[in-house]
Amino acid sequence: MEVERVQAISKMSKCMDTIPSEYIRCESEQPAVTTMHGVVLQVPVIDLGSSNEAEVVRLIAEASKEWGIFQVVNHGIPDDAIAKLQKVGKEFFELPQEEKEVIAKPEGYQGVEGYGTKLQKELGGKKGWVDHLFHIIWPKSAINYNFWPKNPPLYREANEEYAIALRGVADKLLEALSLGIGLEKHEMKEASGGDDLIYMLKINYYPPCPRPDLALGVVAHTDMSALTILVPNDVQGLQVHKDDHWYDVKYIPNALIIHIGDQIEIMSNGKYKSVYHRTTVNKDKTRMSWPVFLEPPPELLTGPISKLITDQNPAKFKTKKYKDYVYCKLNKLPQ
């Protein structure tokens, strides 16, 4: 094994009131100290099924400028497709460890796809209380099925069904984000890679943690992607940083949680905001989430859309290949 899995540490520490020191955050990050307790943030909830399209565009643009996060209901993905996605993901993480290790990230592998634990450099050697599985679910030309579990048997079918349904939601959101800042409706998707836009699924598995007051699932960050579309399970854990405080985000049943990522902030030249967020863990329950990151192809140059650049509003970000952006972000290098 490349590293000790958090799932294994969780089982070992079940009867203890302690966790390994590398999972204990410094005081300025500890959820018990830094969370606004007693306040649950109701991020904007938008009805994607509304017949008033102009109002939907306005609400999405407003939420993306002020919050960088919102939830959508009546999104058109069948509840059954989401339930199947969650079921097979949960079943994968409940397999014997050696079966999961079959699709672990190979030693020295530079990509993110595969089963793993550590993702990016953390200062002071700290670790997040999470195991994960990454793989591309769309477009078909970019999929590497070696990173898809063969077990449970319905894993592939459930993920393919979800990917097909998700594309309609993604197109609708990207169109609204374009129209919301005065672009033609196709321009934001085009600038993100068009039909080559990569849908990268990540399953986050946060096992029970004896000291949820001291640990974080995923450290505070913004997403590198253009857009993130996330399905949670029913265990609370997402927190958003707003007005200098950390708040729990209230889930709406059957909603999708939408994060504005770095690339949309860059392409909009700062009009839209990439959401700063983190995840907490639970003492008794396993939390899981299924974000899909909509990412430009690695070689695509991404930067502010030229129509949005004027003498009064010069470019606030550099244009660079998406893969170079990712490399700098994962290695904590200046952009």
Image (cartoon, rainbow, N blue to C red):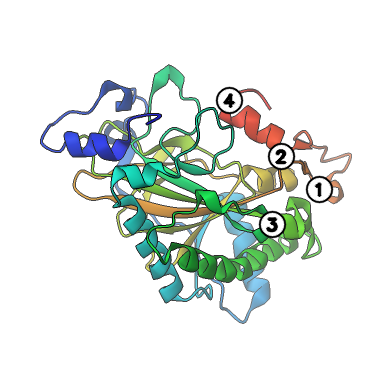
Distance CA(mark 3)–CA(mark 1): 27 Å
Determine which of the numbered discs, if any, sits on residue 322 in the image.
2
Query: Which residue lies at the image location 74% right of the left edge and 60% below the top edge?
Result: 195
Residue closer to the observer: 313 or 137: 137
Determine which of the numbered discs, if any, sits on residue 331 in the image.
4
Q: Relative to residue 64, is residue 153 drawn left or right?
A: left
Q: Are marks 4 and 3 in contact (CB under 8 Å)?
A: no
Determine which of the numbered discs, if any, sits on residue 141 in the image.
3
- Rendering quarter of residue 110: top right
Name the residue at the right extreme: 311
Q: Relative to residue 228, is residue 271 drawn left or right?
A: right
Q: Where 306 falls versus 258 (above or below)? A: above
Distance CA(mark 1)–CA(mark 4): 26 Å
N-term mark: 2 or 1? 1
Distance CA(mark 4)–CA(mark 3): 28 Å
**Residue at disc 3, secondary structure:** helix
